[in-house]
Image: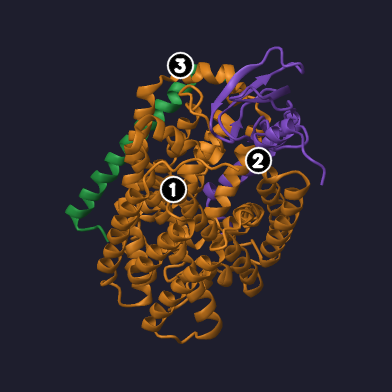
Chain colours: A orange, B purple, C green
Amino acid sequence: MTSEAALLPAGVGWTLLAAFSVLWIGLGIYWGRRNKSFEDHALAGRNIGLALGSATAAATWITSNTTMLAPQFALQLGIWGMLAYSTAAIGLLLFAPMAGRIRKLMPNGYTSGDFFRLRYGRVAWAVFLLFTLFYSLTWLVSMAMAGGILLNTLSGIPYAWGMSVILGVCVLYTMRGGLAAVIGTDFIQSLIIIVGIVVVGVAVLSHVPVEKIHANLAAERPALLDVLFPAAIMAIFNNLLFGLGEVFHNNVWWSRAFAFREGVAGKAFALGGLIWFPIPLAAGFVALASGALNVPVPAADMVGPLVVAEVLGEAGAIGIFIIVFCSLASSIDSLLAATADLMTEDVYRRMFRPAAHPETLKKIAQWVTLGLGLFTWAVCLPRIGTLATVLFFAGPLVGAMIWPIVTGLYWRRANTTGAVGGMLLGAGIGLFFYFAIGFYVASLIATAVSMIWVLACSALSKTRFDWALLREAE
Amino acid sequence: MPAIPAAAAAAAAAPPPSFSASAPLSSDTGYTRLDWNASGDVVVEQARKADLSDARTIYEGPNHALFLSGLGGGTYYFSLRDETGARSAPLKLTVSHQSLTQALFLTAIGFLVFIATVAVIFRGARDDQ
Amino acid sequence: MTFSTQFLSALVYGSLAWCAVTALGLGTLLIRDIVRGEIW
C-alpha cells in the first residue's frame, strides 16, 4: 500500500476547481451564442484564424499525458525517453501539408469519416469507425480517470468527485459552445500550461544546477544517460509512429483542418507542432532532478508533482494543479466535440437521416456530447486501473491507418483493397506482436505491415480515383 | 488453541519490516518498484553483494514504496531496517537489459517506415492526370 | 557512451527558452489577429 499525504489542503483544491469551472463554462456559454447551425457548432463557421488555430493544435496535443507522463517517461527511459516523447510533435508537423490538401479536396467535408466513406467506400468506413471509436473512447476514459486520480493525489478531493467535476465542466461548455468554445478555451489553457512549465523549470534549475543533476544521474541512474539504452531507443520510432497514426486519422485533427480559415490550416498545424515540441523536454527534465534534489519517488507517475512541491512548496502544488486541470480540459473538450461530431455526421446523418436540417444536427451533436460524457462517467466511476492500459492497444490500430490515409490523399491508384487489408492486417499483426514481444513494437510493426500491403495493392492497381468524388455537395 | 509465548506475541504486535514481493525481482528496462510493509519509518539499503557487505542507504522515511530506475545490468540486493533495528530478509533484483541488436534493428525499421511516409507526403499528389 | 552534461544543459535550457518564446509568440499572434479582425 502506498498512501502518501496530499500536497494541497482539500479546501484550496476545491476553490481552484470551482474558479476554473466557472471560467470555462462562462466562456463556453458566451462563445456558444454565435452558433446557429451544425456547421457553426461543429466547425466554428470554418473561419478560425492563425493565433487560435496554432494554439488549439498545440493545446489539444498537450494532454495530461504530456505534463504528467513526460516526467514519468524521463524517469523510466532517461534522455532518450524525453526525446522519444517529443517526436510526437512530428505528427502535427507532417499533418500541416496534409491539412491544406484536405481543405482543398474536401471543401464541404465535416469529419475524417467523410474521407473514408467517399474515398474507399462503406467497408473501409466501417473499419475506420470501429478503430477510431475504440481509440477516442479509451483516450477519453483514460483522461477522465487520470483527472480524478491526479486531483485526488494533489489535493485529497475524492476520486469520484474530481472525475465528475472535470468531465461535467467539459461536457457543459462543449455542449453549449461547440468547437468555438473548445478552441477559445484551448488558447487560454495553452498559454497557462506553457508559462507554468517555464516557471516550474526555472524554479527547479534555481535549486539544482544541470551539472549536479548530470553527476547524480551518472552515479545513481547511469542507464538514463546511456546513448545505447535498449528499452529507450526502441521507444523512439514506436512513439513517433503512434503519434503519426493518432493525428492522421482522428477527427479531432480533421475537424480542425476543416474549421481553420482558407490558407491557415497548414501554418497553424506547423506552428502547433513547433509549440508542442519542447514541452515534453521542459516538463520531463524535472523528473531527472529528483535524485539530485533528494526527493524520494514512491511511484513513477507521481515524480513531477513531488519534485515541484519540493522546490516551490504550496505555490508549486497550486501551479501543478492548474497545469494539470488545463491540460486535461484542453484535450477532453476536443475529444468530446470531435467524437460527437463524428457520431452525428457519420452515424446519425449518413446512416439514418441524410435529409436532417442543420439546426436539428446541432441539437443532435449537443445531445451526443452529453451522452458521451455520461458514458465516460459511468465507465470511469468504478476506477478500474487496468482500463487505462487498454489505450496502448490503440497503438497498432492507429498505426495501421497511416498508410491508407496518406496514400488515399495523394495517390489516385490507392484503392479499397489496399486500405481495408492494410488496416486489418496491420492491426491484427501489430496486436499479435503487442502480446508476443511488447507494447514498444506494436505500432511500429502495424505501420510497417500496413505500408507493405498498401504499396503492393497500389502497384497492382488498375483503378484511378476521381478526386472530384471527394467534393460531395452539401 | 495453544498458549502463545510472550516473546512471539510481542513480535506479532510489531512484525519486522518485509518486502511485498515474495520472489526475486527482475527487470529488462532498468526500472522497478520496491513495495514493503512496515509499521513506522524504515531505512532501505542497496547492495551489489549477496552478503550486503557493501550496503548503502538509498531511502529513509515513512513511505511504503520506492521507484528505482536507470539501473545498469547486474544483480542488486535490497534490505529494510525499521526504528527498532529489526531487518527484513534481503530482496534480490536482476537487471538484464533487452538485446541492443534487436533494439537497433527495430529502430532501423522504424526509420525506414518514417522516411517513406514523409516522402509520400512531400512528393505530393501523383498520377493526377 | 553517455550523454554529456553539455548536451543535457542544451536540452534543458533550450527547451525552456523555446517554451518562453512560443508563449510570447502566441500572445503577439493573437494581438495581430485581433487588430486585423481575423480572430475567427
What is the chain letter for disc 3?
A
> Alpha-carbon distance for marks 3 and 1?
29 Å
Which quadrant is home to the C terminus of chain A? bottom left
Mark 1, residue position: A62
Mark 2, residue position: B110
Mark 3, residue position: A211
Callout 2 crowding tier (Cα within 10 Å): few <14, some 14–19, many ≥20: many
Q: Give, as a three-letter code, the residue at label 1.
A: Ile
Q: In this orientation, which residue lies closer to the viewer: A211 or B83?
A: B83
Place residue A227 in its image quadrant: top right
SS under mark 1: loop
What is the chain letter for disc 1?
A
Callout 3 crowding tier (Cα within 10 Å): few <14, some 14–19, many ≥20: some
Disc number lying in front (3 or 1): 3
SS under mark 2: helix
> Alpha-carbon distance for marks 2 and 1?
24 Å
> What residue do we see at 38% from left, 29% from top?
A311
Disc number lying in front (2 or 1): 1
Question: Where does the image place residue A242, in percent across and percent down from the top left?
Answer: 59, 48
Vertical comparison of A37 with A378: above or below: below
